[in-house]
Amino acid sequence: MRHLYTWSGILVVVFFSVVGDILIARAMKQVGDVHAIVRRSGVWTVVGRVLSNSNFFLGVTAMAVAFFSLLFALSWGDVSLVAPAAASLTFIGNAFAAKIFLHEKVDRRRWIAALLVAAGVALLAG
Amino acid sequence: MTFRKYLVLAGVTVFAAAGDSMLSHGMKQAGGISIDHLQGVVLAILNPWVAVGILLLLAFFASYMNALSWADLTYVLPATSLGYVLLALVAKFALHEQVSPMRWLGIALISGGVGFVAGGPALTAHHHEVSPKDPLLPKPGRSGAPEHASAASTGAES
């Protein structure tokens, strides 16, 4: 029963982390290349564009929810399981979500990278 | 990829690692925080390590968003994971902590993964809600490596 709590906590953390990352990534693609905008119309144009983007605020909210659910999950399960499991599953989840929702071309190169990084993070944090 | 963009990716890595370690050092000094004593959060911010850690994590978030404005999420994320490698190296060579063989294997896997992604294009998809007539939009393939640019743009224009 405790296992079930821990793993559902981990899945909630992963879900909101992925949603947050996807929304922030989408917001910044809508804002446009920051370097080009700063060169042409200054840094305040970037700030204005980011602050008027609703995906940005939704993304930050999702990341905050992910952070607090991580705190809850940590109180249910061991740090040595929850932290690396959440971090490494977020990498895999982001690769799927970036392909589906951001239309990124996740080729074999990037799949291998996502799997290697996820495995590495699990080993490092474990 | 310009030198400036490599600097941003380096910033993502370094700020995340430095911010996390300062925050963790400071929180250990400040003591634990429980749900019943939420005022402990406010007191923790007064700890200089925690305050600098938070500033560094803000810098991390700014460079992370900067990177996402011209590169794919699946390109930027492995760059952030290099921060874990950096932390382990700092633990080994600056703090003289013991790094187990399992951790060295983890470092090798992450570095390998980053190497795989770094060899490919940085940007493969323009978001469909962005108007192609937007004068601020980067030219297609400008951020990608030249040999991948054509393949990348055909896959992206859906």
Image (cartoon, rainbow, N blue to C red):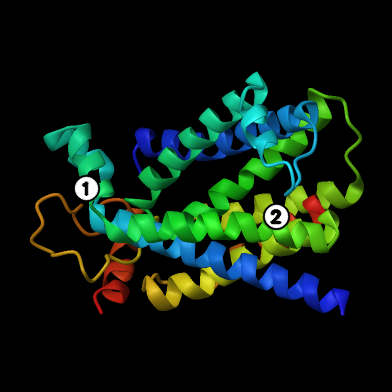
Residue B67 screen position, x and y as percent: 39, 46
Nearest to the eye among marks 2 and 1: give it: 2
Kindly check if marks 2 and 1 are in contact, taking CB atoms under 8 A apart as contact.
no
Image quadrant occupied by the C terminus of chain B = bottom left
Residue A34 located left or right of residue A37: right
Tell me if residue A71 can be seen: yes
Place residue A84 in its image quadrant: bottom right
Residue B83 screen position, x and y as percent: 63, 41
Q: Residue at x 8, y 61 (%)?
A: B133
Q: Which residue is mark 2?
A: A71
Q: Which residue occupies the extreme front position in the image? A: B36
Q: Is residue B80 above or below residue A42?
A: below
Amino acid type at circle 2 is Leu
Q: Residues within 10 Å of mark 2 (few under 14, many from 20)?
A: some
Image quadrant occupied by the N terminus of chain B = top left
Q: Residue at x 53, y 66 (%)?
A: A18
- Residue A90 image label: none
- Residue A49 image label: 1
Residue B7 screen position, x and y as percent: 43, 33
Q: Is residue B115 above or below residue A22?
A: above
Q: Residues within 10 Å of mark 1 (few under 14, many from 20)?
A: some
Task: Choose between B57 and B68: the one closer to the eye.
Answer: B57
Tell me how far mark 2 sits from mark 1, CA to CA.
32 Å
Place residue A57 in its image quadrant: bottom left
Q: Residue at x 88, y 31 (%)?
A: B97
Place residue A92 in its image quadrant: bottom right
User: Subunit of mark 2?
Assistant: A
Tell me if residue B121 can be seen: no
Amino acid type at circle 1 is Arg
User: Subunit of mark 1?
Assistant: A
Q: Residue at x 27, y 67 (%)?
A: B127
